[in-house]
Amino acid sequence: MTSPSTAAPQATPANQSSAAPPSKGARGRLVLRGAVVVAAIAVLGYGVHWWTTGRFLESTDDAYVGGDVTVLGPKVPGYIAQVLVTDNQAVHAGDVLVRLDDRDYRAALAKAEGAVAAQQALLANLDATARLQTAVIAQARASVVAVAADARRARDDQVRYQDLVAKAAVSVQSAQKADADYKQLAANRDKAEAGAVAAERQLDVIATQKQQAQAALAQAVAERDIAKLNLEDTVVRAPVDGTVGNRRARAGAYASAGTQLLALVPAHGLWVDANFKEGQLARLRPGMPVKIEADVLPGRVFHGHVASLAPATGAQFSVLPPENATGNFTKIVQRVPVRVQLDDADGRLGTLRPGLSVTAEVDARGDDGASVPSAPKVAAR
């Protein structure tokens, strides 16, 4: 008989071996395979991006925002009476920025206006003199007619008295008196005729004086206009919309003509000067779209287009252009400034300001590989 204390052997579960965890080598192989797949996808994505887009892009971080910054100063010298703007103040075209003391210029204008009035009065006086001289000429001609009539009558009397003396009808003394009267009236006639000629010639003198007066009047008017312009130039106005910067004007200070009082940064029309390497120029064309990223606002993209390419490298426009004909030579990659015109919405003074560093990326898709266009030819005259 079998002893009841004898226990049956315990059975081992059938799935004990399959439930065992994978080894470390198997996990490493799985991670490696996943990394290879991810890397392959990344390389494939980069390759597709480079083939479709990246190979057409030319970029540079040697680029800066530019603008027509206007340095304002007075056209006339004087002491500054008022400074009506502060630093970094936005202004509109025509706003008054600075006023100079204008008392001297007002006095000069009053003097010039007085000179104009004097010349106008002189010209009016000459016109009146010419009209008066016309009347004098008419009077002189009438006198000539009257004296000539008296002379003819005296000549007739002289002839009659000579006949009467021959007939002993009158005395010799009477004949002599008639002869003297005729000669006197003849002389008066000649005098009257000369006076009439002199009166007519006086009109020529008056006409010459009138020309001189007109020239003097024109000169006086020009001096008055200059005085008026000088008075207007004591007020410095904003030529365009923009923001005031670098203000040096101070009330009470003396400013000579052309002294820099302040600078005005325009509110519109900003651009970017991107200095591309010479090896990047082959595909750049005016009109190509450009993306701009500014260091002042990372992540913000501005848009524009290529406006023009400089006719020479930046080194050629420096104060001392390089001269490689003598001495040792080390080749240095040259850069050519490319003007990028910002779109209207992005070309306003706001986030972008002249002088800021940016990165420019030109999309050259559609380029046919032609050479960089040269400057337009001037037609022969």
Image (cartoon, rainbow, N blue to C red):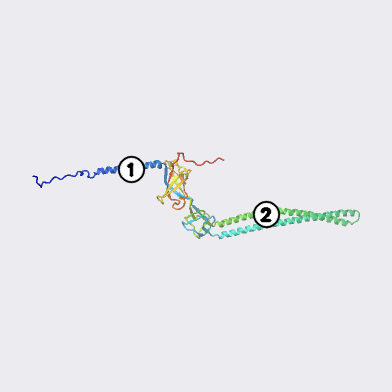
Q: Residue at x 67, y 54 (%)?
A: 210
- Disc 2 residue type (three-letter): Lys
Residue 11 image-quadrant placement: top left
Please state if 209 lies on the left or on the right of 57 as rendered.
Answer: right
In the picture, the disc for residue 350 is none
Q: CA distance from mark 1 to mark 2?
A: 99 Å
Q: Which residue is mark 1?
A: 39
Please state if 253 lies on the left or on the right of 222 as rendered.
Answer: left
Residue 161 in the image: above or below residue 275 = below
Q: Which residue is mark 2?
A: 210
Q: Residue at x 57, y 59 (%)?
A: 106
Please identify the residue farthest to the left as the structure is shown. Answer: 1
Q: Quadrant of the N terminus?
A: top left
Q: Position of residue 135 (x, y in %)?
A: 74, 56
Q: Secondary structure at mark 2?
A: helix
- Disc 1 residue type (three-letter): Ala
Please identify, in this view, whether the residue under mark 1 or under mark 2 is nearer the observer: 1
Please state if 371 lies on the left or on the right of 148 as rendered.
Answer: left
The image shows a total of numbered marks equal to: 2
Q: Secondary structure at mark 1?
A: helix
Q: Quadrant of the C terminus?
A: top right
Which residue is at the front of the view, 276 or 123?
276
Q: Position of residue 317 (x, y in %)?
A: 47, 45
Q: Position of residue 372 (x, y in %)?
A: 47, 40
Which residue is at the front of the view, 379 or 225?
379
- Mark 1 and mark 2 lie on one chain; the one further toward the N terminus is 1
Q: Residue at x 33, y 43 (%)?
A: 39
